[in-house]
Image: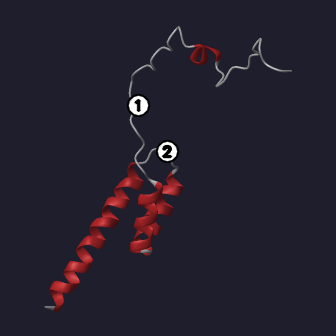
């Protein structure tokens, strides 16, 4: 019974550390020194290290590879770059 409880606690911990380690090692944006430091963090502080790595190494969205839609030619706001127009009306009190 004791072995089953220990196994149920250790297997998810080891799996999380393994996934975190793979995330760190596959990240090409960080230096080798930084990778080594993060791997040590994951394995020396098992739960906290893995959680920190998962928080830092979020997936970036893949580019959509689509152009933005062209602004409507009748839309003055889309072409002017301003959010609002200021104008004086003939019947306004100045």
Number of marks drawn: 2
In the figure, 92 relative to 4: above or below?
A: above
Residue tagged by mark 1?
A: 63
Residue 76 in percent (x, y) is at 60, 13
In the figure, 73 relative to 44: above or below?
A: above
Q: Is residue 92 left or right of residue 31?
A: right
Residues at discs 1 and 2 in contact (Cβ within 8 Å): no
* Residue at 78% from the left image edge and 18% from the top image edge: 92
Residue tagged by mark 2?
A: 29
Q: How many residues crowd mark 1 within 10 Å: few (<14), some (14–19), many (20+)?
A: few
* Residue at 64% from the left image edge and 15% from the top image edge: 80
Residue 33 in percent (x, y) is at 53, 56
Looking at the figure, which quarter contains the C terminus?
Answer: top right
Residue 50 in percent (x, y) is at 40, 66
Residue 20 in percent (x, y) is at 37, 60
Q: How many residues crowd mark 2 within 10 Å: few (<14), some (14–19), many (20+)?
A: few
């Amino acid at each position: 019974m004791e072995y089953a409880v220990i196994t149920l606690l250790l297997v998810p911990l080891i799996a999380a550390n393994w996934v975190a380690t793979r995330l760190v090692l596959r990240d090409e944006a960080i230096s080798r020194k930084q990778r080594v430091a993060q791997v040590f963090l994951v394995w020396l502080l098992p739960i906290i290290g893995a959680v920190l790595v998962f928080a830092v190494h979020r997936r970036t969205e893949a580019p959509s590879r689509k152009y933005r839609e062209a602004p409507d030619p009748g839309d003055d706001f889309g072409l002017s770059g301003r959010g609002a127009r200021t104008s004086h009306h003939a019947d306004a009190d100045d």
